[in-house]
Image (spheres, rainbow, N blue to C red):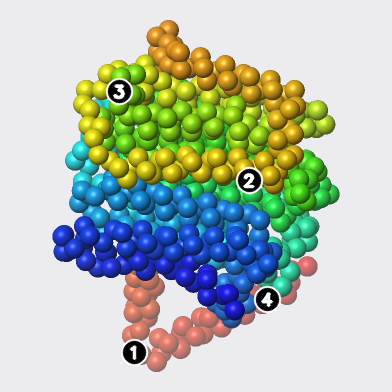
Amino acid sequence: MNEWIFPVLFLAPVLSSIPIALAYRHRELVRKMPPLSVAGIFVSLICSLYILFHPEIFMDKSFSYEWIPQLGIDMVLRIDYLSASMGVITALIAFIIAIYGLDYMKEDYRLPWYWFFFNLFTASMLLVVYSDNLFLLFVGWEGLGIASWGLIGHWYRDDDEITFVGVPERRLGPLKLWWPPSFGGWRAISTIRFGDVPMFLAIAAIWMLSDGHNINISEINWESLFLKAGAAGTIIIFTMFLLGLFTKSAQLPFSEWLMTAMTGPTTVSALLHSATMVAAGAFVFIKVSWYIHPWHLHHVEGLEFVYALVLFVGLVSALYGALVATGMLERKVLLAASTMSSLGLMFGSAAASYWIHEEVSGMNLALLAAFWYMAVHAFAKATLFLVSGHLIHATHSRFSEGDLEFGKKMLPAFLATVLATALLVGFLPPAYWVKSAMDEVMEHLLIHEKMSIPFVLLVAASICYAAILARFLSLNFLKGEKPHHEHVEGATLMKAGYLMMVSVLFILIFIILTQLPEFVSAGFMPASFAVGSAVFIAYIGAIVRPRISAFSKIGTFFNDRMLLPALNDLIAPAIGFAVAKAVNYGNKGIDAFCNTKVMPALFEIISKGIRAIQTGYLKDYTKIVLGFVMFFLVLSAIWGVMP
C-alpha cells in the first residue's frame, strides 16, 4: 500500500532536474528553472520524513520490487534505525544546500549540468541509504561516482585560479602541487574506480557463497558465509569490499582525491563532505556491521583481522587528516582534510564494535557512537563549507583571510562558524556526548583488550582536530590578514543556508538528550572530562595563536600533505605505465608469434615442403607411402627387442 513512496523518493530529484537539462540551449529559461530542481529534492525530504514519523508502517520492514528474476535478485529496500535517520539527514542537508545554491550558482555558465548532477548525487545517496540488496546498493554507489565526476570537474575550462587547489606553478622537483578542476574530477573518479571493481567482485562472491544466493544485507547468514569462505576467504572478500568503502571515504592511502575535489563548487563540497559520497563508505560499513553482529562472531577465523584493519586504518587516517590540516591555508582544503579525519573516527568507532558488547537501547554502543557522530558531523561540516563559500564569494579568495573588523561585517557567518566549530570539536553538546561515547569505546579497548594505540590515536586526533577548526575560525574572522577585496552585501539565501544548517544541531541535542541518555552519562566519565578539557585547551590556544612562525617549515610539509600527492601523481602513474609497457611488449610478442613472425614462417616452411612433394607422379607418392611403412616397421622392430 505504501510502496509508492520509494519510487517518488528516488525519482523526484532526477525527474525534476531533467527539464533544466533539456533546456540547456535557452539561457534565459534555464535561469528561471533551478527552483524546480530544488522542489524535487524537497519532495524526497517529505517522503523521508513520512517514513521516519510512521514507524508502525515502515520500521524494520523490507519492501521488494522484482528486478532480475533469472538470478533471484529483487530490488529490496529496508527501513531500520540507520536508514530511517540517515535518509532524513541526506535529504534535509541536500535541500538546504540546494536553497543556498540558488544564490551561489545563479550566475554560473553550466546550470543545466550542475543541477542535473546535483540531483542525481542526492538520489544516488538516498538509494545507498535505503537499499538492502547489495547489487541495488552498488547501483546507487556508481551513481555517486559519476555524479561526483560531473560536479567536481564542473568548471572544466580551468580558466579561473580561484577554482584551483594548491598554489599555481608551485613544484617540488617533478611533483606539481596545484590542480585544476578538470584534473580534480578525473582524479576522483579514477581513485574511486580503483576500489569499486574489487567491491563489485566481493559482492559477486557474497552472492555465490550466501545461502540461497541471498544478498540482502539484513537477511544474509553472515556467520555461515564466513565459515564457508574460511579464514583466508573471509579476509580476501571483506578486504575487497572494504577497498570500495576506503576509496569512497578517502581513507589512507586513497585520500588525495578528496583534497583536489575542492576544485568543484562549494555547494558540491558541502554535500560531498556531509551527507553523500564520503559519508557513504562509513555508512555502509556501519550498516553491514549492524547486521553482521561481529561481537558475537569471535569464533569466526579472519574476522578479527578485518576489524582490526579497519580500526587502525580509520584512526591513523583520522590523525593524518588532522595533522595535514594544521598547515593548510586554503579554506575548503582545510575542511576537506578535517572531514577525512572525522571519517576515520567513524570507521574506528564502528570497527571497535567487534570487541564491544555494551548495548544502548538494544543497539551496539560503538556503532551508535559512530552513526551519531556522522549525524553531528554532517550538519556542522555542511555549515562550515557553506560559510566558506560565502567567504570566497565575499573576498574573492580561496585562502583564509579575515580580521575582527571583517568578522563584524560577516556577523551571521562568524556566529555560525563559532557554533559549528564548538559543537563539532567535542567540548559542547551534542558532539561532547557523542565523543564521550567514543572515548568510552576506546577506553574499553585500552582496559579490557589491552589495546592502547587506539585510545592514543583518538586523543591525538581529537586535539589536532580542535586546533584546526579553531584555526579556521581565527584566520577567517579574528586574526587573519585583512581581505584584499570585500563584497559583503546581499547573499541572503547563502546566509539563510548556513544558519538553517547550524540550527539543526540544536535539534540533535534534543534527540540525543531524550533518546540516548547513555551518551549523556558517558560525558561524566573521568576520561571524557580529561579529553574534553584537552580539546578545549587546544581550541582556545589555536584561536589565540592560529599561526606560529617557528613551525612554518613543518606547516608547509603538512600543507603538502606529507608529500602523499607523489603517490598519486608520480609513483602510481609510473607503475601503471610500466605495467602498460610490459603488457604492450607482451602483446607485440604474441602478435609476432601468432601473426607476423613465428607461426607464418612455420606454415610457410610446411607449405613449401608439401608443395615440393606434390609432383603429380604416382610412383613418387608410392615411394613416400613405402617410406612411412618402412619407418614404422623399423620402429616396431626396435620397440620389440627393447627390454
| Residue 637 tag number | 4
- The residues bearing labels 3 and 4 have C-alpha atoms spaced at a distance of 108 Å
Q: Amino acid at mark 2?
A: Ile
Q: Residues within 10 Å of mark 3 (few under 14, many from 20)?
A: many
Query: In terms of secondary structure, where does tag 2 sit?
Result: helix
622, 17: nearer the viewer: 17
Query: In terms of secondary structure, where does tag 1 sit?
Result: loop
Contact between marks 2 and 3 (CB within 8 A): the answer is no
Q: Amino acid at mark 4?
A: Ala
- The residues bearing labels 2 and 3 have C-alpha atoms spaced at a distance of 35 Å
- The residues bearing labels 4 and 2 have C-alpha atoms spaced at a distance of 98 Å
- The residues bearing labels 4 and 1 have C-alpha atoms spaced at a distance of 33 Å
Q: Is residue 323 left or right of residue 242?
A: left
* Residue 574 place in picture, x, y as percent: 39, 38
Image: 201 above or below 502: below
Seen at 73% across and 55% down, the residue is: 292
User: Nearer the observer, disc 3 or disc 1?
Assistant: 3
Q: Specify which label sits upstream in the sequence, 3 or 4.
A: 3
Q: Specify which label sits upstream in the sequence, 2 or 1.
A: 2
| Residue 406 tag number | 3
Q: Amino acid at mark 3?
A: Phe
612, 343: nearer the viewer: 343
Q: Residue furthest bottom?
A: 618
- The residues bearing labels 3 and 1 have C-alpha atoms spaced at a distance of 104 Å
Q: Specify which label sits upstream in the sequence, 4 or 2.
A: 2
Q: Name the quadrant of the N terminus.
A: bottom right
Contact between marks 3 and 1 (CB within 8 A): the answer is no
